[in-house]
Amino acid sequence: MPRPHLLPLPLTLALGLFAGCGEGHPELQNLGSDTMLEVAGAWSQAYHAVHPQVVVSVSGGGSGTGIANLIAGDVDIANSSRHLKDSEIEAAKKHGHTPVQHHVGYDGIALYVHKDNPLQSVTLEQLREMFGDGGKISKWSQLGVKIGDGGTNDDTIVLASRQNNSGTYEYFREAVLGGDSGRYKSECNNLNGSKDVVDFCGKTRSAIGYSGLAYATTAVRIVPVAKTAGAPAVIPTAATVLDGSYPISRPLFMYTNGEPTGEVKLYLDWIKSDAGQRVLQEHGYPPLRPL
């Protein structure tokens, strides 16, 4: 029986490793969160190395895309960096599905600036004033920061955000902008993927953006975040995410329609095992437990 047609995806991770697999090999369709895309691909390859009869096809597109495909019954596993919404659970039920949540790891949402940006720390309130609709912070000088660029100076803060189908977009709004009532400034640059936000900040001296902890590069700096003015500013690491001291951290999920069975269950069990969690940790994500 042919695989169901997937919804159009803005981002796909092609795993050429699996090209040419013969018939009879189980193929699992796994897509969704861009935050989880790289580690999902790494899990797929590591699992295939020890279970060569199983093919796990991984695609991105955002948590919302993965969940929409799960609701439609078109995928085996949806990756999500947020909880399902009540409306999504109801939609799944109308399709005869009962989504089941599987906690597979953690992530810290890091604040990225250009590597030459001297910003030492930022508070949650300052982030709300920068990114939130009606916020009063729009200039680096308001934070005591001067951005120089080849003899010129651009004091305007350039905001790098995600698109609204992103779980990271939803969680940042929840944790920083005040939940469902929070709104982003219209001047935010809404970028397709986690990597795109970091790349944008690495090329734009006056930018600040949020993205998954695992996407750091040498072109950017991660800015420590304080819960309130005067509180310690904490940099996101596996330790600070797991102990709760970093204020913008979240669980990572995989969802299935109903309790998983067969190869899907075996794959999820492996992901949550020490072997799967080491792959997660090696790619910069905090694991479910200290290893």
Image (spheres, grey):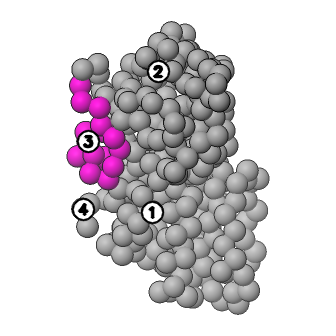
Residue 196 is left or right of residue 20, and the answer is left
Gap in angstroms between the C-alphas marked 2 and 3 = 28 Å
Q: Is residue 59 visible?
A: yes
Tell me how far mark 1 sits from mark 4, CA to CA: 15 Å
Specify which label sits upstream in the sequence, 1 or 2: 2
Judged by its main secondary structure, the magenta piece is loop
Which of label 2 and label 4 is nearer to you?
2
Callout 1: helix, strand or loop?
loop
Alpha carbon distance from label 3 to label 1:
20 Å
> Residue 41's quadrant in the figure?
bottom right
Q: Residue at x 51, y 9 (%)?
A: 136
Q: Nearer the viewer, residue 31 or 203?
A: 203
Q: Which residue is mark 3?
A: 244
Mark 3 / mark 1, whichever is N-terminal: 3
User: Which one is in front in this view, the residue at disc 1 or the one at disc 4?
Assistant: 1
Amino acid under label 1? His
Q: Is residue 108 above or below residue 4?
A: above
Q: CA distance from mark 2 to mark 4?
A: 37 Å
Residue depicted at 23% across the width and 46% down the height = 243
